[in-house]
Amino acid sequence: MINKRKGNQKRPEGIIISLLILTVFLYLLVTFIGLQTDIKEKKVEIDVLSSQYQQQLAQNDELQKLIDKGDEAQYIEHIAREQRNYVYPDERVYFDITPGSY
């Protein structure tokens, strides 16, 4: 008479085990979703780095062609004029400062 439980009543141990299983499942689900997000971010990063790598290879090929032709002095002059605004000592450079001219 002490153990007169019906089939509908659950034992406390069963409820605890069910909650534990549910908690583990939710943890695994959240971890899985987080890992999928990390994977997508890394794929984007790989695409960006791959693009940068291809650009660097193209630039290296261009520089190698310049070196092979012997035009490196001309290339250096071009870069100095364009990026550093360098000029020859006896060279005169004029700037158009009129409004509206570009």
Image (cartoon, helix red, strand yellow):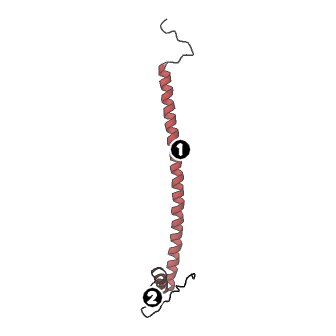
x, y percent for residue 84: 45, 81
**Dot label at residue 87:** 2
Q: Which of the 4 image quadrants contains residue 88?
A: bottom left
**Of callouts 2 and 1, which one flags the residue occurring earlier in the amino acid sequence?**
1
Placement of 49 over or under 90, stated as above or below: above
Mark 2, Cα crowd under 10 Å, few <14 / some 14-19 / many 20+, is: few
Task: Report the residue at 50% width, 23% height from top.
Answer: 15
Rendered location of residue 80, percent (x, y) = 46, 83
Residue 5 position within the rendered picture, expressed as x and y whole percent measured from the top left? 53, 12
Regarding mark 2 in the picture, which secondary structure is present there? loop
Instruction: Farthest residue to the left: give it.
Output: 89
Q: What residue is shown with label 1?
A: 33
Q: Residues within 10 Å of mark 1 (few under 14, many from 20)?
A: few
Mark 2–mark 1 CB contact (< 8 Å): no
Identity of the residue furthest to the bottom in this view: 90
**Depth check: 101 or 9 in front?**
101
- The extreme front residue here reads 99
Tag 1: residue type? Ile
- Residue extending furthest toward the top: 1
